[in-house]
Image (spheres, rainbow, N blue to C red):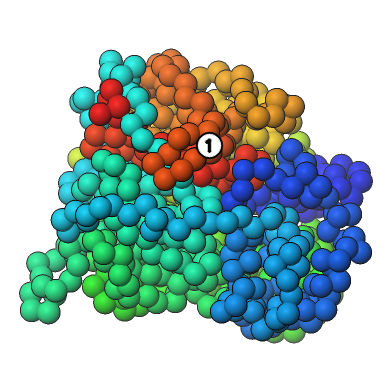
């Protein structure tokens, strides 16, 4: 079938908009500092003005003189120019300054010239990043310890359920939920907050930070030296310490960055504990926080090669997603697996590889174009991993393949043995070719990442003995898999129209009775379900109730306002908290889907460390502590980024 099925012939800018939508899912996993986009480079929908990028500007001349030789002909660890657009402007700027990796090439340039280069390459002016250490607490608290019920990871538990039952916080007390304090992420919000004891951990542009949960002052801040960090996980050593282990930190903060490196810090002091690189490809990324279980850190590996699949000048593709396991106490790499196991081979000339991944001539149009010269590649894991301790496996969900060679690994749920890393089973969620062609013909899509898994796997208990594994795709289909029978698909439910920015993204949630599914569909041709919330029966997949799509209510741009849920949901007692692209957090009754409360977060806040700006609510916005709800506004956003952490408690106490 045609890889661009459903794409109508139109202007180059129109085609670029479609391509950008396909790659925006990668952008949504990155911090985008700054509260407004450059009007000359981007319009209100994030579409890039190609004419400006290729203009004969002074910045273009500087690039040709100082940068083009390497970045237009990348080798080794040199990133291609096109990939720089998906890096934060502040990180590129830091690399050009004295002491930065690119300082020798930028020698002699004025600050104005450096910033013009950054704007050319990233589309944004670099902003000054306020050092969070200027807001240190007068005294640091006791050693940070992980306590029962702490929200120590992105999903709040290793099963991916995103659920807390807090008797004091329910629909009956919701009206008492008031803003206690707010915090301005340095540079821009990167991802969600996690909590342990009386400490809140978060990542902003340039820093990983530990905040006092009562006052919002900083216990410590760890500089990330220009690396992109999305979120951190907090863990304690599970085994009883003996001998030298007695000197181990009481809590450990673990995170990955955009160089494929995993870092562990002492949770009490912020000092380095260990670091190890698990992915050496120049475009490898760790976009989701690790999952920790039984003193092992499980790390999802992704890449930023996806946007470059649309660049005819780029030799595509070679990066692969996977999973790595690291010993928490030492940083020792225990095992690493790639989701695609077929050997990387030349495509198009018949050289190398086996018959399944070799073409007799130039790669055909259905593979995306002649620049797909090697493969198979892709199958990134952008969302946190899920642990099944009963069966001894870790589950990864995978995204698209770069080019259609038909390799196993992409568009799948893959189960790996927790101890050895051996692949136990894999279930592909890719439809039959005829069904796939039918679906793609109705949508504006290149039909490549449409069938990617958009969420982590959610392991839901059906009984004391039985579980079901639930996963959703950007095509709008939710699947229930049998984890006890090699991932056999038990049911599939279409909950949305789907699209490259449609269907279900980031994460679902579950309580004892229902699976709660947020609908994105921001590029839906009809918008029938954009922003709705569906509750499913875990055993059958039947839709129990569905909320009507909310009326978009952006306070910054009415013309391009969209109210899709490009965010994971969180269940607290009898309520479902969920974030929207129009800047709102909306709270629904878990019983029947009735709207209980709306919070417009896209405003300016007087923060404990200055001024915080809210924005779109995307990614993993709502986490829950023992006595507070934490909302991140403006992360994972390109249209209305922000830097606000909003802390709500009963009566603001």
Instruction: Please determine whether, in this image, residue 353 is positioned above or below residue 447.
Output: below
User: In percent of the image, x 80 and y 72: which residue is there?
Assistant: 63
Can residue 407 be spotted in the picture?
A: no
Report the side of 198 relative to 453 (left or right).
left
Quadrant of residue 43 within the rendered picture: top right
Instruction: Please determine whether, in this image, residue 339 is positioned above or below residue 276.
Output: above
Instruction: Please determine whether, in this image, residue 208 is positioned above or below residue 488.
Output: below
Report the side of 275 relative to 557 (left or right).
left
Of 125 and 357, which appears nearest the observer?
125
Q: Position of residue 269 (x, y in %)?
A: 26, 64
Quadrant of residue 440 within the rendered picture: top right
Report the side of 423 relative to 3 (left or right).
left
How many numbered markers are drawn?
A: 1
Instruction: Please determine whether, in this image, residue 121 is positioned above or below residue 73.
Output: above
> Mark 1: few, some, or many residues within 10 Å (few <14, many ≥20)?
many
The residue that disc 1 covers is: 614
Q: Position of residue 569 (x, y in %)?
A: 43, 35
User: In percent of the image, x 29 and y 34: which residue is there?
Assistant: 628
Q: Position of residue 382 (x, y in %)?
A: 51, 56
User: In percent of the image, x 38 and y 58: which residue is there?
Assistant: 133
Q: Point out the image quarter for the C terminus.
A: top left
């Amino acid at each position: 079938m045609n890889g661009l099925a459903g794409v109508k012939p139109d202007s180059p800018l129109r085609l670029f908009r479609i391509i950008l939508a396909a790659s925006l899912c990668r952008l949504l996993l990155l911090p985008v500092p700054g509260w407004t986009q450059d009007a000359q480079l981007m319009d209100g929908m994030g579409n890039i003005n190609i004419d400006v990028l290729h203009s004969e500007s002074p910045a273009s001349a500087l690039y040709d003189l100082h940068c083009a030789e390497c970045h237009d002909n990348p080798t080794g660890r040199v990133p291609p120019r096109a990939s720089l657009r998906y890096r934060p402007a502040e990180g590129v700027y830091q690399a050009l300054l004295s002491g930065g990796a690119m300082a020798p090439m930028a020698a002699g340039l004025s600050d104005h010239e450096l910033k013009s280069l950054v704007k050319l390459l990233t589309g944004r002016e670099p902003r000054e990043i306020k050092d969070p250490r200027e807001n240190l607490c007068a005294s640091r608290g006791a050693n940070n310890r992980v306590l029962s019920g702490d929200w120590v990871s992105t999903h709040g538990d290793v099963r991916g359920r995103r659920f807390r039952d807090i008797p004091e916080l329910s629909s009956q007390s919701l009206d008492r939920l008031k803003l206690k304090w707010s915090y301005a992420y340095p540079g821009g919000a990167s991802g969600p907050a996690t909590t342990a004891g009386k400490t809140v951990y978060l990542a902003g542009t340039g820093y990983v930070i530990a905040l006092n949960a009562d006052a919002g002052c900083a216990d410590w801040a760890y500089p990330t030296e220009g690396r992109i960090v999305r979120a951190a996980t907090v863990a304690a050593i599970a085994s009883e310490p003996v001998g030298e282990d007695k000197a181990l930190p009481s809590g450990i903060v673990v995170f990955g960055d955009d160089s494929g490196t995993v870092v562990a810090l002492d949770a009490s002091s912020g000092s380095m504990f260990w670091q190890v690189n698990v992915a050496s490809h120049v475009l490898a990324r760790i976009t989701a926080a690790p999952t920790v279980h039984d003193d092992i850190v499980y790390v999802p590996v992704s890449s930023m090669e996806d946007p470059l699949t649309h660049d005819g000048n780029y030799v595509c593709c070679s990066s692969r997603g996977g999973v790595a396991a690291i010993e928490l106490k030492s940083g020792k790499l225990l095992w690493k697996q790639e989701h695609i196991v077929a050997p990387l081979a030349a495509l198009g000339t018949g050289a190398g590889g086996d018959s399944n991944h070799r073409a007799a001539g130039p790669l055909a149009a259905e593979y995306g174009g002649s620049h797909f010269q090697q493969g198979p590649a892709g199958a990134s894991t952008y969302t946190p991993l899920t642990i099944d301790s009963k069966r001894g496996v870790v589950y990864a969900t995978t995204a698209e393949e770069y080019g259609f060679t038909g390799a196993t690994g992409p568009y799948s749920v893959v189960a790996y043995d927790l101890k050895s890393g051996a692949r136990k089973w894999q279930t592909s969620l890719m439809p039959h070719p005829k069904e796939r062609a039918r679906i793609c013909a109705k949508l504006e899509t290149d039909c490549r990442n449409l069938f990617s898994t958009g969420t982590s796997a959610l392991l839901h208990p059906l009984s004391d003995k039985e579980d079901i594994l639930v996963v959703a795709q950007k095509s709008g289909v939710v699947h229930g898999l049998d984890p006890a029978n090699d991932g056999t698909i038990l049911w599939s439910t279409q909950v949305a129209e789907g699209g490259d920015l449609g269907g279900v993204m980031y994460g679902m949630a579950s309580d004892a009775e229902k699976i709660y599914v947020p609908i994105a569909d921001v590029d839906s041709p009809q918008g029938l379900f954009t922003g709705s919330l569906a509750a499913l029966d875990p055993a059958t997949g039947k839709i129990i109730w569905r909320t009507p799509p909310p009326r978009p209510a952006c306070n910054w741009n009415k013309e391009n306002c969209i109210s899709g849920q490009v965010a994971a949901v969180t269940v607290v007692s009898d309520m479902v908290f969920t974030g929207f692209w129009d800047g709102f957090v909306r709270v629904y009754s878990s019983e029947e889907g009735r709207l209980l409360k709306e919070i417009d977060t896209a405003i300016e806040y007087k923060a404990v460390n200055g001024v915080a700006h809210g924005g779109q609510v995307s990614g993993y916005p709502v986490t829950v502590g023992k006595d507070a709800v934490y909302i991140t506004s403006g992360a994972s956003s390109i249209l209305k980024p922000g830097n606000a952490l909003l802390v709500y408690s009963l009566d603001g106490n």
